[in-house]
Amino acid sequence: MREKGWEKTLPPLPNVEKYGRVVTRFAPNPDCVLHLGSARAIVLCYEYARMYNGRFILRFEDTDPRLKRSSLQFMDMIRKDLEWLGCIPDEEYIQSDRIEIYYEHAEKLLRDGYAYICTCKPESFHRRVMACEPCECRNLAPEENLRRWERMQDGTYGEGEAVMRIKTDLSHPNPAVRDWPAFRIIDTKKHPHPRVGSKYRVWPLYNFACGVDDHLMGITHIIRGKEHLTNQERQKYLYKYFGWDYPEAIHYGRLKIEGASLSKSKILRGVRDGLYTGWDDPRLATFLALKRRGILPEAIKRLMIDIGPGAADITISWDNLYAYNRKMVDPIANRYFFVWSPVRLLVKGVEKEFTARIPFHPDYPERGSRVFHIRPVEGSFTFLISGRDAEQMKAGSIVRLIELFNVRVEHTGRDSIVASFYSEPYYDAKKMGAPLIHWLPEGDGLPCEVFMPDGSTVSGLVERSFGSVPIDRVVQFERFGFVRVDSVGEKIIVFFTHR
RNA sequence: GCUCCGGUAGUAUAGCCCGGCCAAGUAUUCCGGCCUUUCGAGCCGGAGACGCGGGUUCAAAUCCCGCCCGGAGCACCA
């Protein structure tokens, strides 16, 4: 039960007392950058390890040099993603370093008669297995299997001509688990592995490498998506044959986020085809994109903890993420005036000079304030206001320029509005219910472009004092939303975070 | 089609194992009010949910059965 104000925590892990120390792992294929979909596995594994003073392992599963080619570059980007998220692994393994280990285990299974080398055509094997019947290779003697294994290694068999299969129950209700494949041949002359080149031509499939590694690395709690539920069934045969105990397993449901694709292949294709500007395109839900938009890693963590390890498929709303982020960002973000689609506002009848001091943050006056000097020329002064505010203004209406004075609109034009000084006191505006709008002295703004999450941009001018804000800082453009400072050059570039 | 997993308000989550204190809690969202020289934050109030149908029981979101809906797997991918 959680009291108000208490942070939500994860439910306890099952059977922790059975193990000396909790060990979890995150096991990505380094074939893409990480995204919000990966966050669930990462945060759950990391937080549980921390919660029980355990270890969190990063394991790169790069055993497919052909279809899901990994790359050194992605391995590095993944490490950086994890670092940014604040989920730094205690240990790291790479499966392409461990091929010999898989071979040893394969040979043991072959010798013990728990596996065989199958040279059947996939279609004919499939037919047999659907009928719960063994294929011709299944009853081969261990010696013959070992000979065939040798022929897989030495090149006698070509790509696709032989696989090693694990014996299961041919009558298993789920045909998908019957005698599943554990190793296949890949012509690494044609498809060299990015790390080990063409050193190996027999490569383990997911269930073999993963199953063996989870045991060897002492994983106590496997936390992964429920699409792996049948893989667990398959891997349990391995554990039975080796005499190992299967770890605790938690299979969480599929996670989607409204309006964004969490498909690696779509992200990969989109970036490659130039549909996106890069891995950090604000339309993407990659960590890189979220980071660029000013989403704090802690917000992602909190959201994932809030969601927890449930098995239901869910579609989270961006608002769920934004709410956490806003809570963290609001107190730290200083406020600035940003005028977009600017419209000129000429105010007549300004008979004296004004100085406006506006705090950088309304709740923290100690942070100081920005200062604007209004020096009218012949009783007139020209401001810039946002187009959206200009549209609302009608002749005769009173509006207040925040922290300055009230004006009465005289007439409105396409790109300029003429008004006259009305009064200075704030309470005049308050008692009339006059709108409060932000403003900039004309000629005093810095050009600024905001990149929005939908790929569009908003351009306008930001107040002069903004020039000293460092890159990467998240600030709030008043009455517009939070943004993260991306670059400062001829133009200031910021990325929209959320409202 | 076969196998498996799910289904609490718009979204997410608590409760379900060990039926009653749940005419269902929390966060967010939306609406209203207060406060505030931001349409931000904060505070107060309101709206909004147990997929459907049976059964067991004094009592069911919780147990049983059937149905419906959603998802995943059925690769020499991970």
Image: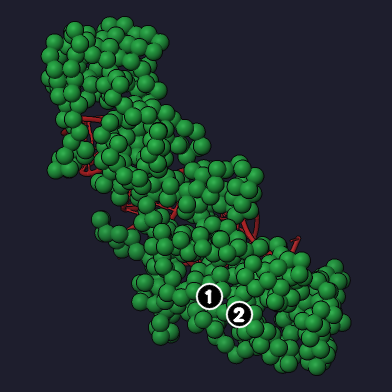
Chain colours: A green, B red
- Image side of residue A166 versus residue A428, left or right: right
Element assignment for label 2: loop
The image's mark for residue A93 is 1
B18 w.r.t. A422: above or below? below
Residue at (44% x, 30% y) in the render? A458
The answer, for residue A141, to whether it is visible in the render is: yes
The image's mark for residue A98 is 2
Label 1 is found on which chain of the structure?
Answer: A
Q: Where residue A397 appears, x then y in whole percent?
A: 26, 11
* Callout 1 amino acid: Tyr
Q: Are the residues tagged 2 and 1 within 8 Å (C-beta)?
A: yes
Residue at (50% x, 79% y) in the render? A219
- For label 2, the crowd category at 10 Å Cα-Cα, with few meaning under 14, some 14 to 19 and many 20 or more, is few
Residue at (72% x, 81% y) in the render? A166
Label 2 is found on which chain of the structure?
Answer: A
- Image side of residue A339 versus residue A379, left or right: right
Q: Quadrant of the C terminus of chain A?
A: top left
Q: Where residue A417 appears, x then y in whole percent?
A: 32, 11
In depth, the one of B59 and A449 nearer the eye is A449
Q: Quadrant of the N terminus of chain A?
A: bottom left
- For label 1, the crowd category at 10 Å Cα-Cα, with few meaning under 14, some 14 to 19 and many 20 or more, is some
- Image side of residue A435 versus residue A103, left or right: left
In depth, the one of A73 and A119 nearer the eye is A73
Instruction: Give the spatial CA distance, label 2 vs label 1.
Output: 9 Å
A301 w.r.t. A182: above or below? above
